[in-house]
Amino acid sequence: MSMEAEQQAVVSARGIRVEFGAVKALDGVDLTILPGEALGLVGHNGAGKSTIVNVINGGLPPHQGTIAYGGVDGAGGIATARAGGVRCVFQELSLCPNLTIVENTRVMHAGLSGFGWRKRALSLIRAKLDEIFPGNHIDCTATVGELSIAERQMVEIAITFAAVTDAPRLVILDEPTSSLDAGLAEQLLAHVRRFVASGGAVLLISHILGEILSTSSRIVVMKDGRVVASRPAADFTVHSLVEAMGSVVKERTRGGARIRTEADYSIERAPSAGSPIGFKARKGEIIGLAGLGGHGQTDMLLDLFRDHSGNWLPGHGDAIAFVAGDRALNGTFPLWSILKNLSIGSLPHLARLWAIDGGRETALSADWKSRMEIRTPDMGNPILSLSGGNQQKVLFARALATKAEIVLMDDPMRGVDIGTKQEVYAILRAEAEAGRTFIWYSTEMDEICLCDRVYVFRDGGIVAELTGEEIDESHVLAASFSGEAA
């Protein structure tokens, strides 16, 4: 890249190296982002994406290399990055749950000060939410802890794009649609395109490769802490992008052709009030829960878990397991090791004479570390030492390592790379063939199409049941908006 382009760049990182013990998180990374550019950043979990983001936003000083903002070498630090116009929406959302949306807006924008700041903050965040997500019904006076994970993601995005004193020059979006349904995701990506067209820059990280290809002007591929490809987005296809990441594209197989009419029902629920359809799941089925986000899918999973769990009684917890979508709130134990986070679901089966057998616990974790390809040199490391996607793998391993006959999954693939997704899909199918029942809420249509049967939710109830060739985006959308399958 020319010296002139370097000077015009919003951010220019050169020769960045970061090491965590024996792990080389970044190994000589060069990355430049220009005004009016949407840069897509892809790679498997642990490739170094989150680390380079933390270097760019000033949260992590590099061990080697330099970083410049607007052509001026910076001393580093969050204040320097923010002065350079860098804003970031993290994969692990950073809002304060005990504060209102208005108060969180003030925390992120120090310019909202003096008399009447609450009124100005309310007006600012309300306008930005309506601009990015038209038709939302978020109460901006509500406490963040009262919001769904999708609403929290929408609020953090709106706060980040908002301008009080200075407009953002670079917005880093780390898995920004991971909790959004298809409609909300498209609203966000449309706003990203408008922002870039106006001269802003965006660094977009997403494991949904269709979003990367449709939104980015240039794509950078990372692998093992290095940049292995950097080309215009038009030069990539999904196939070539996955190959550049180091995976093999596998043909997607539909689950709808697999009907298990001979199996017994493991779950039967009568229709809820105002809903014409009840819920049933057979042994060995993979059941999808679809529809617009926030229409009762997660509530159904929670109700099923309460109905079938052992309520912490020893020996009564084998019936059902739960993979949480919001790992930070409902999934991980942040002060525990990776091993302890994985094994906690299997403790009754790891005990010997009322004590945990350390050898069996270590063997269990080693087995699932290998099967899920959890990227860590030591399972004794803290769970927060892992990337977000690798943390999600641990939650998956925790559930699958149990003897549970029913596994509930609340959008569990958030932040998981495509290679691992394909491996997990194969594990799910094998476990289902062995008789396990999976009930899977997903905001990704590709995952819904892998299910044997799909229930579409609207206004808290089931409005359609889809099987076979009916399981596609058009039928799901038709049922989501009209209450009837097309």
Image (spheres, helix red, strand yellow):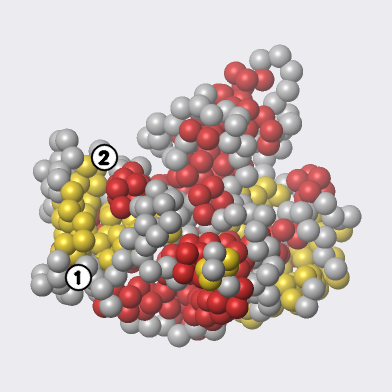
Q: Disc 2 designates what residue?
A: 460
User: Disc 1 to disc 2, how far (Cα)?
Assistant: 24 Å
Residue closest to the eye, 318 or 356: 356
Kind of residue at disc 2: Gly
Residue 234, position in %: x, y? Answer: 49, 73
Question: Element under label 2?
Answer: loop
Q: Does label 1 or label 2 sit earlier along the sequence?
A: 1
Viewed as shown, does residue 408 lie left or right of 399?
left
Q: Can residue 171 be spotted in the picture?
A: no
Where residue 448 is drawn, which disc sits there?
none
- The answer to whether residue 370 is seen in the rendering is yes
The C terminus: image quadrant: bottom left
Looking at the image, is 190 positioned above or below residue 402? Answer: above
Q: Which disc, if any, is residue 256?
A: 1
Q: Indicate the quadrant where residue 123 lies.
A: top right
Q: Residue drawn 22% across and 42% down?
A: 461
Q: Residues within 10 Å of mark 2 (few under 14, many from 20)?
A: some
